[in-house]
Amino acid sequence: MKKLLCIFMLVLATTHVHAETVKYISDQLQAPVRSGPSTKHKILRMLNAGKQVVILENAESGWSKIQISNEDEGWVLTRYLMNQPAARDRLAQAESQLAKYQNENSRLKRELQQVSSQSKELSSTVKQVKKDNTRLSQEYESLEKTASSAIAIDAERMQLKNRLAQLEQEFKILEQQNARLTDRSKRDWFIVGAAVLFVGFVLGLIIPRIRWNRKQSWDSF
């Protein structure tokens, strides 16, 4: 059906182009070309069916003057002329056009298959790129969390370092205070010891006198 439609459209197109100035020898016979518009004139040549000619003049006697090429002219009976090429020529032309269209259609199908294959490859590439993008995004988020953790750890380390320095300073202060207290304690103990010795020395001087005085007082009785 498509083939017949293509042939019909080609026939219409060909008829529209050549209807005004061009005629074709009927496909039913070979037409004699004569030197004048009658059967009494000399036959110059025979034209095969489907031959394209140009109408130069139409006579009322039923003859037409035609031009076969740039120089050859002659007369043929008007009834031998058609407004369109012979059916076999139109069929051959239509089949040629159809073959051309079929070849073009095959080429377009091959190109379509190539485009489809490229599209599949591109789709696969896009999917792979999306997977890689997702993986990289996850890795970036992990690195970002790690970096945040590292920053937090570093900040905590700095806080601990500062706290350690503060504690060391406080420890030094406590050591100094302890040293002072130790010195004071030693000094206090030294004073106490000295006082004890002094008291003992004094008592050592006083007690014998007291005993001797008591003995004298008892002897007086």
Image (spheres, rainbow, N blue to C red):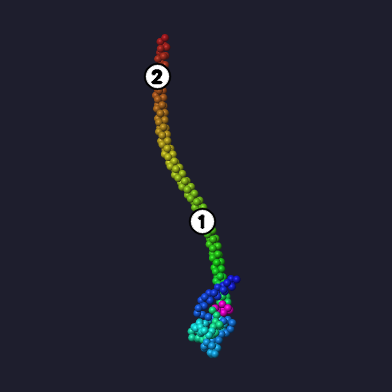
Q: Amino acid at mark 1?
A: Asn
Whether residue 98 appears in this view of the structure is no
What mark, if any, has residue 133 been given in the picture? 1
Q: Residue at x 48, y 84 (%)?
A: 70
* Callout 2: SS: helix
Q: Residue at x 51, y 84 (%)?
A: 59
What mark, if any, has residue 10 been given in the picture? none
Whether residue 11 appears in this view of the structure is yes
Residue identified by numbered label 2: 206
* Callout 1: SS: helix
Relative height, residue 129 to residue 35 (above, below): above
Could you say which quadrant of the image residue 76 lies in? bottom right
Relative height, residue 144 to residue 77 (above, below): above
- Judged from this view, the residue extending furthest toward the top is 221
Q: Rounded to the nearest whole Å, what is the CA distance between mark 1 and mark 2?
A: 105 Å
Residue 198: percent from left, percent from top: 39, 24
Could you say which quadrant of the image residue 77 lies in? bottom right
Residue 12: percent from left, percent from top: 54, 74
Magenta-colored span: 84-90
| Side (left or right) of 112 relative to 217 | right
Closer-to-camera residue (134/123):
123
Could you say which quadrant of the image residue 30 lies in? bottom right
Q: Quadrant where the N terminus lies?
A: bottom right
Mark 1 or 2 closer to N-term? Answer: 1
Q: Amino acid at mark 2?
A: Ile
Residue 71: percent from left, percent from top: 49, 86
Can you tell which of label 1 and label 2 is closer to the viewer? 1
Q: Residues within 10 Å of mark 2 (few under 14, many from 20)?
A: few
